[in-house]
Amino acid sequence: MPRSQVTVKTVLTVCATVVGVLAAIYLFIHGIVTLTLTVTALLLAVALNHAVARLQKAGLRRPLAIGLVMTVLLGLIVGTSFLIVPPAVTQVRDMAERLPELNERMHQTRLFQWLDARVGLEQRLGALGKGSAGLFQQAVDPALRVVGGVLAGVGAFVTVLFLVVFMLIYGGRVVRGILAECLPAHRERYERVLGKVYTSVGGYLSGLAIIAVVNAICTTIVLAILGVPYFLPLGILSGLGSLIPLLGATLSGLVLAFVALASGGVWDFLAVGVYVMLYQQFENHVLAPVIYKRTVELNPLVTLLGIILFAELAGVLGTFLAVPIVGASQIVIRELLLLRRERLNLPLQGDVREQLQKQGPRRPPFWRRPRHA
């Protein structure tokens, strides 16, 4: 009888592969929170490691540099909490109590009546514009429910903090061990990809934090000068809006404008609207390009698709993580395409060839530096 071409080993290998894929899918679905916290800690560790590397370059040993960076970070968080959180909570409570009044005043403004007469704004809003609290009450209810999850947020923060510390201490050793197992012919390429991802993600997150702080400070000052109430929580909201690419700044600007309309009238609404538009132009064309000049540039369509996907997977946090993940994926895909061209002996594209020619001797990444550095 002819010998079968399908051996028992092949059958067991296929079955084990199928079981492994199903187990990976199951762990991904049921461990989305753990994966989210891990990815968040990884991104923060990459961003903080740039500061640690600067301190090492100044002469500090790595353990001391890590301790100093984490101490400064915790000090900033605690100090900001004591200075900003109490007045912000007080203003949020006052705003929640005055929501019915603000809703009524907004309906009485000429701009709202003009829009209602021409486009039927009241009818389009439907149930959102009715009731004792109206639109603002419907908008603030989810935010008030989020406050109930503060304890869970504190637990997640502590978990991420410990993960960041351990990643800063042992991350370089893990990367070095993984690269040591790679083939020597491929190791240089892997190190180049990791170096690009490390620089891109760290620069993006550091720049994003600077942009958010600048936005919050400028917005708070402008709202206070214009006399708009609740300027502190609104300024913080505007700063947090910068953390959500493409959509955050627009949504926070709409909230600022409607609060100004309800509390001060049409002139405050126009003043806040003009400020929001001018600041967005400044942030998009001046501040962000200067900060991101050394980071990878993303295609807007790819960025938008990534934001939509990760927003569906992990909500607001997924939207925040979308850009660095998409940026890292773009670097990997470009390197795979470059490898394909090299294997097929195809000419390199102009931009890739120029980048490789300009790439000179650079400082080795943190995982290749001596431990005593």
Image (spheres, rainbow, N blue to C red):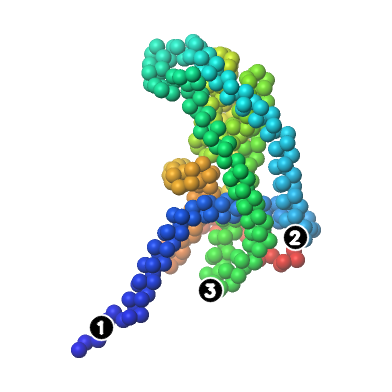
Q: Residue 87 carries which label?
A: none
**Quarter residue 269 falls in:** top right
Q: Between residues 291 and 119, which one lies in front from this camera angle?
A: 119
Task: Locate residue 202, reporting x and y percent.
Answer: 62, 51
At label 1, the amino acid type is Ser
Q: Which mark is residue 183?
A: 3
At label 3, the amino acid type is Leu
| Tag in front: 3 or 1 | 1
Residues packed near mark 3 inside 10 Å, few (<14), some (14 to 19) or many (20 plus): few
| Tag in front: 3 or 2 | 2
| Mark with earlier residue (3, 1) | 1
Is residue 155 left or right of 119 when viewed as pictured? right
Q: Which residue is situated farthest in the bottom direction here? A: 1
* Mark 2 residue element: helix
Q: Mark 1 points at which residue?
A: 4
Task: Locate residue 82, reporting x and y percent.
Answer: 73, 36
Residue sitting at 65 percent across and 30 percent down? 89
Q: Mark 2 points at which residue?
A: 63
* Mark 3 residue element: loop
Residue sitting at 53 percent across and 21 percent down? 258
In the rendered image, the quadrant that contains the C terminus is bottom right
| Mark with earlier residue (3, 2) | 2
At label 2, the amino acid type is Pro
